[in-house]
Amino acid sequence: MHETILRYRYTIKALPVEDRRPIELSDTMKPHPLSYMELPFDPEYSAYNQRMTPERLNNVTDDEQYWAVRQKVIFRNTGEFPVEISGPDAEAFANYVFARDVSRVKVGRCSYNFALYHDGTIITDGVLLRLADDKFWMAQADGELTKWYKAHLGDLDVTISDPDVWVTQIQGPESMNVLRDVIDGEFPEPWRYFDIAEVTIAGEPVIITRTGFSNELGWEFYLRPENCAEKIGEAIWQAGQAYGMILTGTPVFRARRIEAGLLSQADFLGCTPYKAGLGHFLHMDKTKFIGRKALETVDTRSYTFGLRVRGGTAKRGRMITVSGKVVGDVASSSWSPYQQCGVAIVHMDDLDMGPGTDVSVHCIDGNTYSAQICSLPMYDEAGDIVRGRGNEGPAGPEPWQQ
């Protein structure tokens, strides 16, 4: 595979200048600096933050990607978009546009955070990195926040900029072994969940974070303009081969993040943090942030749950019924190779129909199957896996039997 990647990379670089002309889509489908690694596998891309993110590779199935992140280690180039918030008033501004209290985040730490509209509903979320007292990166999920920031700057001394940074995720039980093998020098210490560190890989200084969108043990690296992306990416790739590392696309996390209760934009679109089950992240003791006033009068209960489907994969939309009556929405859905059932994130109309409630759900094959509402996460409630507390990955499927 390594030789094939190199051949594709140098073929692209060898194109005559006249054949490397700008194209109109270059600003709306920007490629990751390491996307050349995906080219041998007939990739299909979608736009995510106006960046290309691989949806399908022809060398690996969805199930194989799932088991790789649960049992070994994966390499995934993402479309996450870090936006820089810097300047003397950076903390005050971040505290105004984000719902969680940014002042509690120390330099060298990350924080899950989200921005709200004035009506209290979620715009999008992401991981906020505090790189200095006056400098943050918000590595956001899909959505428009840059213009939102600029619209609310007021008189604050803050600069909003694109640092041209790209994110790649290394996730799975073997991920820390890969990191130990690839870095030049000592392993980061301390290296806690949501820590930031700067290490050297292939002679290049690299910012890494102990984060990811899998709820598996893992880390992410941030490629800056001054980095030689190929040196870093290929060093990590080569180190990963000893542990069975594979290249993946978006499907690697679809079932896993649903099982973990990690929400995507489809799961909180039009929801307040409370309805989406994210109310415990709010810091309502902050005196002022966008959306706070609206949140003072809304329903503070969560209407978001998991769903396990016996033998089928739920179709998205108003597909959940009891005795023929529609009682809820399917927001996200997939098949779990581990639980051997369909899994979904759902919004229920009635809180009396919480975990343990048997329902029917219309599925993607056109049939209706029995299902059961459940809590999120579906397992590992203590978060032991993501913190590396005794996780070696499951040996194989453990079918849901309820």
Image (cartoon, helix red, strand yellow):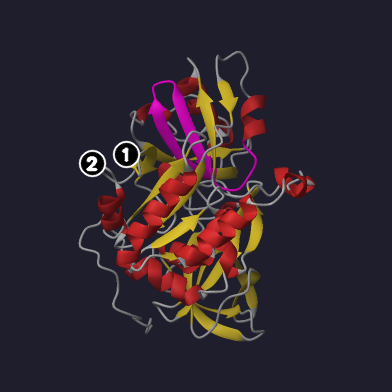
Q: Secondary structure at mark 1?
A: strand
**Labels 2 and 1 touching (C-beta < 8 A):** yes
Q: Nearer the viewer, mark 2 or mark 1?
A: 2
Identify the residue shown where x is 52% and y is 27%: 85
In terms of image quadrants, where is residue 400? bottom left
Q: Is residue 195 visible?
A: no
Is the residue 72 above or below the residue 75 in the image? Answer: below
Identify the residue shown where x is 23% and y is 44%: 187
Q: Is residue 311 visible?
A: yes
Spot occupied by residue 133 in the image (x, y as percentages of width and height): 39, 21
Spot occupied by residue 393 in the image (x, y as percentages of width and height): 29, 69
Q: Secondary structure at mark 2?
A: loop
CA gap between label 2 and label 1 equals 8 Å
Q: Amino acid at mark 2?
A: Gly
Task: State the predominant SS element of the stretch in magenta.
Answer: strand
Badge 1 density bin: few <14, some 14–19, many ≥20, Cα 10 Å: many
Of 252 and 153, the residue lying toward us: 252
Query: Which label sits on residue 185?
Result: 2
| Image-based side of 245 in relation to 384, left or right | right
Is the residue 237 above or below the residue 61 in the image? Answer: above
Of 147 and 363, the residue lying toward us: 147
| Image-based side of 157 in relation to 112, left or right | right
Spot occupied by residue 91 in the image (x, y as percentages of width and height): 45, 23
Picture quarter with the C terminus:
bottom left
Spot occupied by residue 383 in the image (x, y as percentages of width and height): 30, 57
Q: Earlier in the sequence, mark 2 or mark 1?
A: 2
Of 90 and 353, the residue lying toward us: 90
User: Which residue does the numbered mark 1 point to in the structure image?
Assistant: 199
The magenta span reads 125-145
- Total count of labels: 2
Is residue 130 within the magenta segment? yes
Q: Amino acid at mark 1?
A: Val
